[in-house]
Image: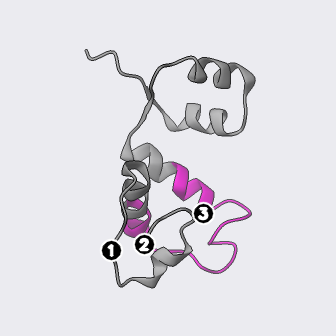
Amino acid sequence: MSGEIALDTSVAVRFLNGDPEVVTRVLALPEIYLSTIVAGELLFGAENSTRALKKKGRPIPMNDVWIAAHCLERGWVLVTDDSDFDYVDDLVI
């Protein structure tokens, strides 16, 4: 066991929503990790929220959600001809 700490989607959402107990505990950690799956779930959830692409009539294919999530998680620049990615916040294209 490496001792590295990875957050599940449920805890990541509580952190992002400002749950004081979770925020305090997460910020006390020296380092945290999010799996690509968690990043994808967070992105999917964001895109399906009331402020999201789906509500704006601009959903993107699920595989593109996973590609975007992986790039966001790793900090990669995505090289693509697919305009669907233009609608993903914070994704560098």
Whether label 3 touches label 1, CB < 8 Å: no
Where residue 17 sits: x, y (%)? 71, 38
Left or right: residue 79 compared with residue 38:
left
Q: For mark 1, what is the residue? A: 79
Could you say whether the residue bearing mark 2 is in a helix, strand or loop?
Answer: loop
| Earlier-in-chain disc, 3 versus 2 | 3
Residue 51 position (above or below residue 82): above
Where residue 58 sits: x, y (%)? 60, 79
Count of picture labels = 3
Label 1 Cα neighbours within 10 Å, binned few <14 / some 14-19 / many ≥20: few
**Amino acid residing under circle 1:** Val
Work out whether residue 89 or residue 39 is closer to the camera in this orientation and state it.
89
Which image quadrant: the C terminus?
bottom left
- In the rendered image, the residue lying farthest to the left is 1
Closer to the camera: disc 3 or disc 1?
A: 1
Q: Is residue 86 magenta?
A: no
Could you say whether the residue bearing mark 1 is in a helix, strand or loop?
Answer: loop
Please give the range of residues in magenta.
42-66
| Spatial CA span between label 3 and label 1 | 21 Å
**Residue at 44% from the left image edge and 55% from the top image edge:** 72
Q: For mark 3, what is the residue? A: 47
| Earlier-in-chain disc, 3 versus 1 | 3
| Spatial CA span between label 1 and label 2 | 6 Å
Closer to the camera: disc 3 or disc 2?
A: 2
Tell me the quarter of the picture where residue 1 sits. Answer: top left
Left or right: residue 12 compared with residue 68:
right
**Residue at 45% from the left image edge and 84% from the top image edge:** 83
Whether label 1 touches label 2, CB < 8 Å: yes
Q: For mark 2, what is the residue? A: 93
